[in-house]
Image (spheres, helix red, strand yellow):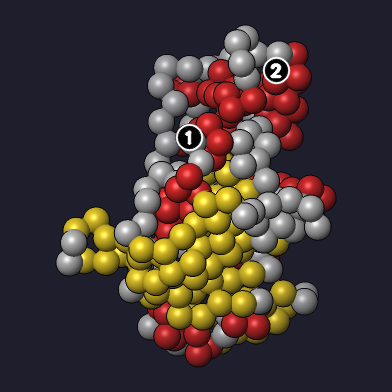
Amino acid sequence: MSGLSLRAFGVTYAYRRDEAVLKGVDVSASPGSFLAVLGVNGCGKSTLLSCMDGLVSPQQGRILVGEDDMALLSRDGRAKVVSLVAQRSYAGRLTVFDAVLLGRRPHITGAPREEDLNAVHSILCEMGLEKHALHYVDEISGGEFQKAMIARALVQETDVILLDEPTSNLDPANQQEVMKLVRRLVDEKGKAVAIVLHDINLALRYCDRFAMMRSGEVVVSGGVEVVNEASIKEVYGMDVDVIVHAGCKIVVPR
């Protein structure tokens, strides 16, 4: 599978000197693989994605995109290889079309080209947003805004895509639509994707790799087999049953 991987080695990060949010984290997003980062609120998931995107620099450890050190890449250089849908996004007083067009900025010198405009139109249609193209982003619903931010990341056409709780404002139908679209990018275009999710069952349905975090550390990682009653108890403190329905694992709280 062609494309770039994104790997974190021994990443430690603290907002305050004596309070480490991440403690020696190792995790990787590989081409053609969909990684779910799972764990309770405050365990460091979003901070990990910020480090992997280069928004913040870890005090210890390295982030490699392909063989390049993220810390040595320019902002434009990072934007050409890694895109991030943050938990909280802001688009200003822009139309949906223009907000999504911002995702093409790393590829544009001067005025947008026809291929840039076509790419935006294509992703808006794919995500069911074409009817909102000329609406301002503050005129659409929260769920539609979230889809527009996802579209902005996808139109960036990076090898690596990072998604921080992208389905949190979406209804169940739109959650499935977004996850199917991202899964298709993984399967058909070999994208390396890492996603932070709170819905374990949604992760089990679409993701193939899992990193389960607790208190700033990855306590278990691997394929679907690592998501089981014991690991969920360790990470979430919950007693659950993990059953298989239609070939897919489902977590049922006791």
Place residue 24 in its image quadrant. Answer: bottom left
Q: How far apart are marks 2 and 1 (CA)?
A: 23 Å
- Asked if 43 appears above or below 50 in the picture, the reply is below
Is 227 above or below relative to 95? below
Residue 137 vs residue 37, the one in the foreground: 37
Residue lying farthest to the bottom in this orientation: 230
At x 48%, y 35%, the residue is 75
- Give the secondary structure at mark 2: helix
> 50 and 58: which one is in front?
58
Q: In this view, does 122 lie to the left or right of 201?
A: right
Q: What element carries label 1?
A: helix
Regarding residue 121, the answer to whether it shows in the image is no
The answer to whether any part of residue 61 appears in the image is yes
| Front residue (pair 231, 171) | 231
State left or right for residue 203 relative to residue 218. right
Mark 2 or mark 1: name the one nearer the start of the chain: 1
Amino acid at the residue labelled 1: Arg
- Residue for point 71% across, 57% down: 31
Location of residue 246 by image quarter: bottom right
Please, is residue 104 above or below residue 150 in the view? above
Crowd band around label 2 with a 10 angstrom C-alpha radius: few (<14), some (14–19), many (20+): some
The image's mark for residue 217 is none
**Residue ID for mark 2:** 117
x, y percent for residue 71: 45, 48
Q: Name the residue under label 1.
A: 75
* Residue 181 in the image, given as x and y percentages of width and height: 71, 47
